[in-house]
Image (tube, rainbow, N blue to C red):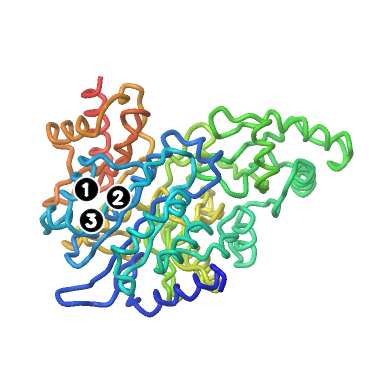
Amino acid sequence: MSIAEEFRQLQTRLLECWDGTETFIPELPKGPGGIERDIVVVPSLSFPQPELAKITGYTHYEERQLYTLIQLRNPRTRMIYVTSQPLHPSIIDYYLDLLPGVPSSHARDRLLLLATYDRSDKPLTAKILERPRLLERIRQALRPNQAYMVCFNSTPLERELAVRLGIPLYSTDPDLLYWGTKAGSRELFAAAGIPHPMGSGFLQGVPELVRAIAHLQEKSPELQRVVVKLNEAFSGEGNALLDLRPLRPLGSPHTPDHLQRIENSLEEMVFQAPNETWLSYRQRFMDLGGIVEAFVEGTVKRSPSVQGCITPKGSVEIVSTHEQLLNAPTGQIFIGCEFPAHADYRQQLQELGQKVGTYLAQQGVIGCFGVDVVATQTTAGWELYAIEINLRKGGTTHPFMTLKFLTDGHYELASGLFYSKHRRPKYYIASDNLCQPHYRGLLPNDLLDMIARYHLHFDSSTETGTVFHLMGALSEFGKLGLVSIGNTPEEAQAIYNQTIGVLDAAAL
């Protein structure tokens, strides 16, 4: 039996144990005193290494899923969390101290931390697969019929690991990942009747790219800019912006002279990744392929997103909307988010997400998905254009799940708001990219000292405050992530501003 066939058999266990009571996480059979489950967390960023290398401190992004430790508040849950390098004990203590109603020592006894002790650029999952003794240790710690695995993104590596461990994976079958590529997203939007920018299908190589740009110019002579995207990239780092205004064709855009002008202009594209050049980008475009589409212009423009979950039963749940915070001036790279999205189009986002989720479910997709959107304001209201689908956890997943697990609340579709168990509406601002040179050299304990001294912690009584992540990236890269939670948008913004102000002043 092939690995793919074994995987599909294992996945039937998710359907058998699902009862749908907890968004994102399948509930497992109940034992005395509650729900018994073993969760194997493999936070591997299984992307092409050249794309990951564009992200500062990406090796520490394995820490972004530490919010899952908050699930240890269920006294019947056990967890195995695997990383490339050992995590600093203070970081683990920080998360366990957030647990409401459970002694941190009790949670710590149910947590097994494992590491590969491998600093190479290979995906974490590949490192685990290369270590049979580590695999066996994980297997021995599991109750197979009460266990499942979660990951950041699913690839053939994660599928193989699930099979080797003999447990299902709560994520998409890698055979369906096409729908999460740039080309697959555009195909789905067209099939589902979802508005999206004019553009191409899958392209591979410079000649195809040049002809596709010429075709867009022919179709829309007034088109000002286009975005070239690598088919599989991360956080917008694979995007490049081309200005067409100096390239107005005198006649047909398909003449040899004009096609050559387009090809020459590709060297002048504005690349979103730092230190990217046409030489390196061209090679990646040949290797991965990509698409080109019209850049959505607009005087007033925003970049919201919608997140959903497809259960093993095939039902679609919309779980959140966000305003994405993108870099200036071109706004292509994700740097953070605000929850929730603007009320003017929150319901439109949810409807768009429902359409995408329904189509994905029909293809057999399960697990997390997100849709990135561009919203432009017109005299008639807001127009939404779907940009791409993410079949994985993303930059909005860990802030939302942190809020959910800390407050034991729920997302309300009617309003698009999140309410804690005390019926307080909750708002937050989050970032993975709080990066300053003067943060370099700070150890996790230094940050914890600042949190204690200046009262920057999350207060469970008011359900407000800041939760930090990416602490391991501080010393080497001066980089930190945070989620600032408030009872109003203004309070969340004030907490966020105060936190950054205190860190800046204390770190200097």
Answer whether labels 1 and 2 touch (C-beta < 8 Å).
Answer: yes
With 344 as the anchor, is 173 left or right in this view? right
Residue type at mark 1: give it. Tyr
Q: CA distance from mark 3 to mark 2?
A: 12 Å
Number of other residues with Cα within 10 Å of mark 1, as a class: few under 14, some 14 to 19, many 20 or more: some
Q: Which residue is mark 1?
A: 95
SS class of the residue under badge 1? helix
Q: Let me know if residue 342 appears in the view.
A: no
Q: Disc 3 to disc 1, how far (Cα)?
A: 12 Å
Looking at the image, tell me whether mark 3 or mark 2 is earlier in sequence order: 2
Closest to the camera, between mark 3 and mark 2, is 3
Percent position (x, y) of residue 354?
A: 47, 67
> Where does the N terminus fall, quadrant-wise?
bottom right
Kindly state the secondary structure of the residue where label 3 is placed: strand
Choose top left, top right, bottom left or bottom right for residue 224. top right
- At label 3, which amino acid type do we have? Leu
Q: What kind of residue is marked 2?
A: Leu
Image-based side of 505 in relation to 266, left or right? left
Q: Earlier in the sequence, mark 1 or mark 2?
A: 2
Q: Nearer the viewer, residue 422 or 108?
A: 108
Q: Which residue is mark 3?
A: 111
Q: Give the side of residue 199 with respect to residue 406, left or right.
A: right
Q: Position of residue 419 (x, y in %)?
A: 24, 60
Measure the alpha-carbon separation of dots 1 and 2: 7 Å
Residue 66: which disc? 2
Q: Is residue 505 above or below residue 103?
A: above
Residue 270 visible in the picture: yes
The residue drawn where x is 52% and y is 31% is 329
